[in-house]
Image (cartoon, rainbow, N blue to C red):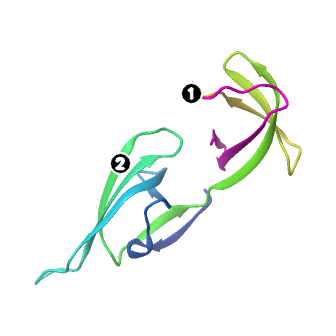
Amino acid sequence: MAKQQTEVRELQEGSYVMIDDAACKINAYSTAKPGKHGSAKARVEAVGVFDGKKRSLSQPVDAKIWVPIIERKNGQVVSVDGNDMQVMDLETYETLTMRIPEDVDVSPDENIEYLEMEDQRKIV
């Protein structure tokens, strides 16, 4: 899996983080002051990039955490067949089959932008 390790204190709203082995985009990030007997804690609330589920995480700010490497790519819709579409990557000219999200209307010869992490893809 394409990921790298970083400290929790370096996370920001809008960036990505791995929670429960799923890539998530951070919606809220807050920290609590260090107490008399403990270190500062961070609370992260995020939504899964590919599944849309809400997840949360509470860790010390100096703990290590995995951050996924998600690539943003461009493609062109080659054909549409029901709920699936064929997309040609504009850099590698590779043809991919992707499911069409319910809230997106696409037509052939249209350029789209999508996120890719390993074998998972999602239209932006």
Helix, strand or loop at mark 2: strand
Query: Does dot 1 land on a helix, a strand or a loop?
Result: loop
- Sequence-wise, the earlier of marks 1 and 2 is 2
Residue sticking out furthest to the top: 82
Q: Is residue 32 left or right of residue 22?
A: left
Amino acid bearing label 1: Asp
Residue 25 image point, x, y percent = 47, 53
Per the rendered image, the range of residues in magenta is 104-124
| Vertical placement of residue 46 versus 31, above or below | above
**Residue identified by numbered label 1:** 103
For the C terminus, give its image quadrant.
top right
- State the residue at coordinates (66%, 19%): 83
Q: Magenta span has 45?
A: no
The Cα–Cα distance between marks 1 and 2, rounded to whole angstroms, is 23 Å
Numbered tag placed on residue 55 in the rendering: 2
Considering depth in this image, is 7 or 79 the residue closer to the camera?
Answer: 79
Seen in the image, is 109 located left or right of residue 58? right
Q: Is residue 106 above or below residue 93?
A: above
**Residue at image x 60%, y 56%?**
1
- Asked if the residue under mark 2 is in contact with the one under mark 1, i.e. CB atoms within 8 Å, the reply is no
The quarter holding residue 33 reads: bottom left
Residues packed near mark 2 inside 10 Å, few (<14), some (14 to 19) or many (20 plus): some
User: In the current view of this chain or complex, which residue is farthest to the right?
Assistant: 93
Q: Is residue 66 left or right of residue 84?
A: left
User: How far from the left and from the top, in percent, is residue 27?
Assistant: 40, 54
Residue that appears at 10% across and 84% down? 36
Residue 60, image x and y in percent?
29, 73
**Residue 101 against residue 37 in the figure, above or below:** above
| Residue 108 drawn in magenta | yes
